[in-house]
Image (cartoon, rainbow, N blue to C red):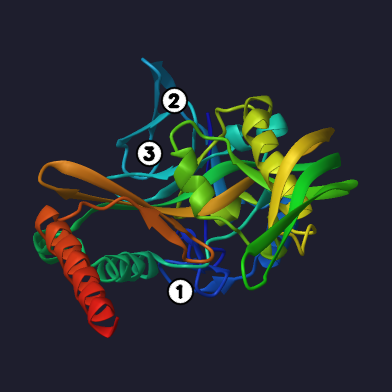
Amino acid sequence: MELMTFKCPNCGGNILFDSTGQQFRCESCDSVFAKEQLEEYEQMLKKSEAPSEYVWEQETEREQVVTGSVSYICEYCGAEIVGDETTAATECVYCGSPVIMNKKLSGIDKPDYVIPFKLTKEDAKTALKNFYNKKPLLPKEFKDENRIEKISGVYVPFWLFDCGVDANIVYDATRVRTWSDSRYIYTKTSHFAVARGGSMEFERIPADGSSKMEDRYMDAIEPFDYSEMQEFAPAYLSGYLADKYDVQASACEPHVNERVNASTNETFRSTVKGYATVIPKSQSVNIRSGKAKYALLPVWMLTTRYKDKPYTFAMNGQTGKLVGELPVDKGKVIKWMLGIAAAAFAVGQIFLFLN
């Protein structure tokens, strides 16, 4: 297995991606580099046949596959680095050196794009705290005693789908007119067949390509800002975890088709206005096959524990959108329901008194 660690041209220290400045920083001498500078320096070293370890070190390490796990030997401290068959970037748990498994990011497995992390670990901690504060039914003990058990910045593999749609939808729509005279109230309901047809183009529909990640969480932290997407370079992974996809693009197509169908129906429905009711009667949605690109997108994963039960949260590492499930204080729920019932009873009494 070819391992890659990015090294500072000045002191040889580890170079990590700095999400705050969107640059690459040496953790030893604090030197800052742009991606173009590292690439230019690499080319200069190759031309001069200088040792490449000043930019990164590449060695063929011992690799051992045992029951689905893969182990490597850290070149700095000699400790064993254990990952699995999809691990593409990690760090040594003993000396903290960032390591990139280059072979899992090359050839057909090389990502097309990456969105670099924009938010830090501290940003993720603050977002989780704010998430707690906005939940009035949360148990007080959870909020007061809860501690983050694990927090990881992970580049999650996604497939980004482009496709086109040709659709025709017919709606049964109604308009209602009401009037009255001295004796009766009249209601007239008119029925209309409303047809809509047209084509739509979809770009970069994301689908999680990792079986480790909860799909509903990955859907919920969207959208990502694709205007900040970069061509993939391994240096962006330095200091973070990353996984290679283990779910093929073809396996994601049913989920993508569902999203395309739902979006098409919602868009077409929004054009039918001025009716009391609108019900789809028949529809034909033909999805034209497109293409899928492979990208790594930034996600902070946070885990806490309460009463021996783990709670996992996911935060978009670019926008800060955070999702997760929380426990509910049953006593607070009962008080809240009783409060609503009491308020409804009071309103009813006022209404009766006025009448």
Disc 2: CA contacts within 10 A as few (<14), some (14-19) or many (>=20): few
- Residue toward you, 50 or 35: 35
Q: Are marks 1 and 3 in contact (CB under 8 Å)?
A: no
Residue 113 screen position, x and y as percent: 69, 50
Q: Earlier in the sequence, mark 1 or mark 3?
A: 1
Could you classify mark 3 by the number of other residues whose Cα lies within 10 Å: few (under 14), some (14-19), or many (20 or more)?
Answer: many
Vertical comparison of 280 with 336: above or below: above
Q: Nearer the viewer, residue 47 or 151?
A: 151
Outermost residue, front side? 183
Res. 89 visible in picture = no
- Amino acid type, label 1: Asp
The answer to whether residue 229 is left or right of residue 145 is right
Horizontal side, residue 285 vs residue 26: left or right: right
Tell me residue 213's x, y (percent): 45, 38
Q: Is residue 236 above or below residue 169?
A: below
105 w.r.t. 54: above or below: above
**Measured from the top left, where is residue 28 in percent x and y?**
40, 67
Quadrant into which the C terminus falls: bottom left
- Three-letter code for the amino acid on which mark 2 is drawn: Arg
Residue projecting furthest to the bottom: 354
Q: Say which mark, if any, is on residue 30.
A: 1
Q: What amino acid type should be assigned to the residue bearing mark 3?
A: Cys
Mark positioned earlier in the residue sequence (3 or 2):
2
The numbered mark at residue 62 is 2
